[in-house]
Structures are given as C-alpha cells and as structure tokens.
Image (cartoon, rainbow, N blue to C red):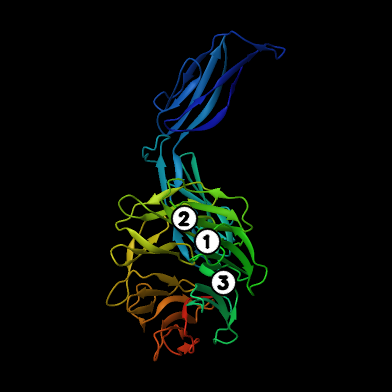
Amino acid sequence: MTVAPDNDTVVVAASLQLVATLRDATGKVLSGRSVVWASSTPGVATVDSTGLVRALALGSTVVIATSEGKSDSATLVLAPKVVVTRDDPSLFAGDTTQLGVTLTDALGAPLVGGPVLWGSGDPAKATVNGTGVVTGIAEGLSQITASCCGGVGTQVVAVLAPRTTANREIAFLREHQRSDGARIATLWLMHLDGSSQVRLSTDSEYVNEFDWSWDGSKLLLTYLNYNTIGRPGTFVLNADGTGEHKVSATIGSPRWSPDGTKIAYHSFPGAPDVYVMHADGSGVLRLTTDGANANPIWSPDGRQIAFIHLGATAAQVGLVHADGSNLRVVSLPVGVSHGLVWSPDGKRIAFAATDGQEWLMDTDGSKITTLCYPGGCAAGGVDWSPDGSHVAISESEGVHILSPGDAADVFLAGAATPRWSPDGSLVVYSAQADTGPAFPWIRTIQSNGTGMQVLTPNDTTNARQPVWRP
C-alpha cells in the first residue's frame, strides 16, 4: 500500500485529498478494497473515510491508511498562508525598506504563529535582517523569503540606481493663433541656454500632450483636432522630430514604460479606463474595466502602474501590476484631484488632494502624510529631483523647492510647471514676462535659487510645459 502525496504542506482551513493505492505481490493494483483512515493528531487535522484531510490548526500530523493489515502514512504540515505585505517594493542601493508579514488561514482569518525567518535569494543585490528590513546593495532584483510554521511567502525587491544623467535639451509647447485664425500648439526643442530652437511638429497641429522615453531617444505625443484643424491621434517620433508614425487614435495621458517597450494610457474620450500597449501600438491590454480610471504613471522599476480611480464619493489612488494582476484601490483620508508622481526610489507616491494640499503615501497605502513647505501647503503638483532628495511644489503664487521635512525653502514667485534637470542641479519652469506683454517665459534656476536664466526672452506666444530630455 502507498499513500500519496506522502508528505505535503496544507494551509490551515484548507483541505487535501489523499489517495491510498493497494497492490498485490506482483505490483498489480487492487481495487474494491476497504481502507480505514486515521489522523495521529485530530485536533490539528481530521481525515474522513475517503482520505480527505481538513486542516484545523498549526502543527503537523501523520495520516495513516490501513487495509487488510497493511498500512502506509503521510506526514502533513499544517501551515499558515504567509504574505509579505509590501507589493513589489523597490529602493536605492544603500537605502533600506521595511517589509512585513501577515499570517492567515486559507479563508483569510488571522493566525498567530512562531518567529518569522527571513532570507534573500541574492544577497549581492539585497540583504534582509531578522525583522524584515531590506538593505539595497546593488542594482537588480532579489527574491526575499519569509518563512513561518511551515508556510513560505516571497516578494521580489528591485534595487534601483538613481537616473542621474547629464543635462541635454528641453522640449516645450508653444500655443498661438495662426494668421488664418486657427489655434495650434506645436512642440519645440532647445538647448539648455535657450539657443537652437527647433520645431518638431508641423505648423498645422494641436499638440495636447507629450512624453519623453526614459532614455530620451523617443517622443510620444497626442494631437487633437482643434476646430477641424490638425490630425487627431497618438504618434511616436525620434528626439530630433524625424520618423514620426501613428501608433493609436487619440488617447489620454500616454506614458512610456521605463524600458521603453510599452505605453500606458487611459481611453479618451468617454468613460476612461487604463490600458497598456506595445510601443508600436500592438498588443493592447485593458487593465481596468469600470470606466472610472485615469492618468496612469509607471513605477520606476516598471512593475506597477498607479492611476487615479474616480470613485463615487472621492477619487482615490489605484494600483495594478503591469500585466493586469493585483488590481486594488488604496483607501485615503482625502480625495485625489490630480498630479500622481512616483518617487525615483519607488517607495512613495505624491498626489494633489481635494483639501488643497499635497500628500505623500507609501506604495502599500501606509504612512499617508501631507507634503508642505514652510508656512503653508498647496495642491498644484510635485516634481522629484532625480535622486529623490528634493521636491518642487507648485502653488498658486509660485514654486517651492525643498527637501521633504526640511525647513529650508527656495521660493520662485510666479513660477509654474517646474521640472528637475537630469543631473538635479537645475529646475526649468515657466513664468510671466518681467516687462511688456503678459507672455510666459521659460526659465531655469539652480536648485539653491541662484543663477536664474530666461531661455525665451523674446517669445510672444504661450510657451509652456518645459520638460528636460532624459
């Protein structure tokens, strides 16, 4: 007689079917024979007359099958379901992040177990101590394991390198009215001193949105049909404006994945949902289905997408894996208005809230706090410095540059849409002209508030949305 499986792990409150096979001396299977089943510790697990085991509590048991004086047994471990509570965590090398564990039965009821043992699959990339604190060692992935009472949970940690690179050109939009009355918005590129300004889109388009690929080699932009002028659609082109090709109809908030192979977006017009497609427009994958999800952003490691979930009462932050799995909505004490921005280390998300303030949340929905500058708060949007050490916060009167939690504050009166340079030394922004007609000028300033330069001093158009080429 043999019992299969002869040893296994069963999550408490789950069941496992055991099978006893009887054979004669020649190995031929015998059928129609009576089998008596028994558990050595019925308080931990029971077994019925068919060999179905039901796990009742943590521990172990031996299940014995007997027939015609012959017996065999299976040793079973009755374990908890172990879940590492941070989803797809990331951090910089040299930084730490705290992981946690929940122990439940198969139905989700909490269990109390023994000590948790932690381990790293690749200590050269990340280590973990006995309390679940992970330390980033080198760029890459490491699977962190948490073991308790026979149960095992895992979570892959990504160690990231700050995307700090040399400064290159600045892209921006110019919106104006043509001599024939048509309203257009064109995409331009200029050097960081404002020289060599080149138009990348034609003089008959209305560019609504654009996004640099993370390596700066491509641009993604959407055209709108504005009063019958222009071609609606979503296009990809090279950084110098060549090679333009259409990849989709007009979509909302298109964003490149960090590896440049995919584009996340929300459907437009109509009730929005979040989608992902390949960079050439193929392989469209719908990630949400309730028509109330918009403005997707990629996590820095490319494994997750955050978006605004337009709830019936107040908008919240939604999160989903890039393959569409593990869709969830974070419950927040405030409603989200706009401006989701992932920190460069992937540990936090900033957002503008309906209470008129900027907020920060850990990506598991914990540690939700306000992000304010000395003397006040605002909800105009945030941009992180490449190393994640500083933020630029927009408000109605201007822009504040500070380190979260630091009293130091650089204030740029009248500034809007700040964006950090790739090397973290400069901030580009737009502000009204100092004299003459009220046209916005694009300017740069050092992160300490000195060395302001006007890049478009003679502009008589609405120059806006300056963004550094990565």
Q: Is residue 335 left or right of residue 208?
A: left
Name which residue lies at 34% across and 52% down.
331
Q: Earlier in the sequence, mark 1 or mark 2?
A: 1
SS of the residue under disc 2 = loop
Q: Amino acid at mark 1?
A: Pro
Q: Nearer the viewer, residue 144 or 353?
A: 353
For the N terminus, which image quadrant?
Answer: top right
Residue 210 can be seen, yes or no: yes
- Disc 3 residue crowd, few under 14, some 14–19, many 20+, Cα 10 Å: some
Gap in angstroms between the C-alphas marked 3 and 2: 22 Å
- Please, which residue is most extreme toward the front here? 180
What residue type is disc 3 on?
A: Ser
**Residue tagged 2:** 269
> Mark 3 touching mark 2, by CB under 8 A?
no
The reply to whether callout 1 and callout 2 are in contact (CB within 8 Å) is no
Numbered mark located on residue 254 in the image: 1
Q: Is residue 131 visible?
A: no
Percent x, y for residue 66?
54, 14
How far, Cα to Cα, is label 3 from label 1? 22 Å
Q: Residues within 10 Å of mark 2 (few under 14, many from 20)?
A: few
Q: Which residue is mark 3?
A: 204
* Closer mark to the observer between disc 3 and disc 1: 3
Q: In the image, is residue 106 above or below residue 356? A: above
**Quadrant of residue 26 in the image?**
top right
Task: Tell me how far mark 1 sits from mark 2, CA to CA.
Answer: 13 Å
In primary-sequence order, the first of circles 3 and 1 is 3
